[in-house]
Amino acid sequence: MNRMIGLMLVVFITGCGSTGLNSEGASSKPADTSFYQHWVHSYEEQNGKKVPNIFRPKGSKEFAPSRFRMQLAFDPNGQCNYMFLSPVDAHQMRDCVYTKIGNTVYLYDNGGASLTHLAFTIQSVNKGEMRMSYGVAKPAVKDAKKKAKPE
């Protein structure tokens, strides 16, 4: 229970993104909202390259038929949906929550479990295109076992 409360707090604090307020509380510049939409993987545009993955907004073009095409949808309040790859081809959108820290996006199922295979790093995003790479860099951890120098 405490894990879930902590996760929801992290999602609430970081999932909403920047407020765009300066130190006086006045709006400094409008926050970029390009990320907050329904994205569809446009792998045909990658010309056989694995990265970056190219996503286009849903409805922006007609995509060729495909057995599976990843889709990700994000709203500014930390809620998201992703296309679940079913082993029996019964693919469907599933609810999730996310945390966006800088260009890194972490997804969690509704039970609070990390969907590590869906975590990604945004390389670029604008209203008409998102380029990203699955996987995120692990945070640097200081070695707590370093021995102190003898005096």
Image (spheres, rainbow, N blue to C red):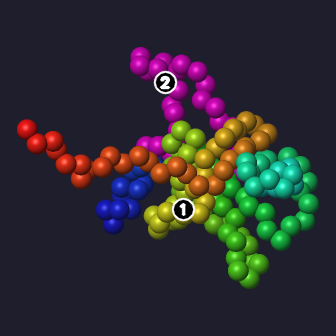
Q: Is residue 96 left or right of residue 127?
A: left
Residue type for callout 1: Thr
Estimate the x, y position of residue 3 in percent, counting from the top left: 35, 62
Q: Which residue is mark 2?
A: 21
Q: Point out the frontmost of discs 2 and 1.
A: 1
Residue placed furthest toward the bottom: 88
User: Image height check: is 27 above or below 122?
Assistant: above
- Residue 68: name its quadrant: bottom right
| Residue 44: % across, % down | 87, 55
Does residue 33 belong to the magenta stretch?
yes
Give the residue number, with chain letter if any, for mark 1. 116
Figure quadrant of the N terminus? bottom left
- Residue at 41% in and 17% down: 24
- Reading the chain from its start, which is encountered first: label 2 or label 1? 2
Whether residue 102 sits left or right of residue 4 in the image: it is right
- The range drawn in magenta is 13-38
149 or 71: nearer the viewer: 149
Instruction: Determine the secondary structure under disc 1.
Output: helix
Q: Going by the picture, which residue comes out furthest to the front?
A: 150
Residue occupying image coordinates x 67% and y 69%: 84
The Cα atoms of the two marked residues, 2 and 1, are separated by 32 Å
Q: Main secondary structure of the magenta part?
A: loop
Whether residue 42 appears in this view of the structure is: no
